[in-house]
Image (tube, helix red, strand yellow):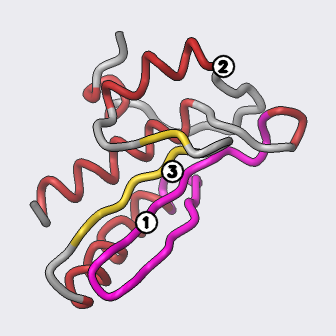
């Protein structure tokens, strides 16, 4: 079973290999609250106000850039929805790779440290 600490210790790398359903099942326990939505993983973060929402986005910006793995962000007054997928897998059709879970774990760690 994959642990959160295993994901936090890894760095995203260019990959064209996606995870199949059996492999996905090993990663979700290490990233609580993340769910599969088709070819991506998704999580919603709640905040007290718009300032906290923007502070969170600014806090994760460095990690996202350093990992070179950029999610789709949906931002509202007190909520941020993050959607990770890997565009290069499945012959360029997109899907879920280990990079998505690495970044999910790192974003969760920032949230837990600063916003929970």
Work out whether mark 2 precedes mark 3 in sequence or the reverse, and give the earlier one: 2
Where is residue 61, by image quadrant? bottom left
Instruction: Kindly identify which residue carries mark 1.
Output: 81
- Residue 66 is situated, as x and y percent measured from the top left of the image, at 48, 56
Lateral position of residue 8 relative to residue 48, left or right = right
* Numbered circle sitting on residue 9: none
Of 25 and 61, nearer the camera is 25
Where is residue 3, by image quadrant? top left
Magenta stretch encompasses residue 73: yes
Vertical placement of residue 35 versus 20, above or below: below
Q: Secondary structure at mark 1?
A: strand
Instruction: Kindly identify which residue carries mark 2.
Output: 20
Residue at screen point 55% across, 51% down? 84
Residues rendered magenta in the picture:
65-89
Question: Of tags 1 and 3, which is closer to the observer?
Answer: 1
Residue at screen point 75% across, 48% down? 87
Where is residue 37, by image quadrant? top right
Of 76 and 113, nearer the camera is 76
- Residue 60 is situated, as x and y percent measured from the top left of the image, at 36, 65
Lateral position of residue 92 relative to residue 74, left or right = right
- Residue 24 is situated, as x and y percent measured from the top left of the image, at 53, 22
- Residue 115 is situated, as x and y percent measured from the top left of the image, at 13, 66
Q: Secondary structure at mark 2?
A: loop
Question: How far apart in space, not on screen, are marks 1 and 3 (Cα)?
Answer: 19 Å
Q: Secondary structure at mark 3?
A: helix
Pointer 1 and pointer 3: residues touching (CB < 8 Å)? no
Residue at screen point 32% across, 25% down? 29
Question: How far apart in space, not on screen, are marks 2 and 1 (Cα)?
Answer: 24 Å
Instruction: Kindly identify which residue carries mark 3.
Output: 67
């Amino acid at each position: 079973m994959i642990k959160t600490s295993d994901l936090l210790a890894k760095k995203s790398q260019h990959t064209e290999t996606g995870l199949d359903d059996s492999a996905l099942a090993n990663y979700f326990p290490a990233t609580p609250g993340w769910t599969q939505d088709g070819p991506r993983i998704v999580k919603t973060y709640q905040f007290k106000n718009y300032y906290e929402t923007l502070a969170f986005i600014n806090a994760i910006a460095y990690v996202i850039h350093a990992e070179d793995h950029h999610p789709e962000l949906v931002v509202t007054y007190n909520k941020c929805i993050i959607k990770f997928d890997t565009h290069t897998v499945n012959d360029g059709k997109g899907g879920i790779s280990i990079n998505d879970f690495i970044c999910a774990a790192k974003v969760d760690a920032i949230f837990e440290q600063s916003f929970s």
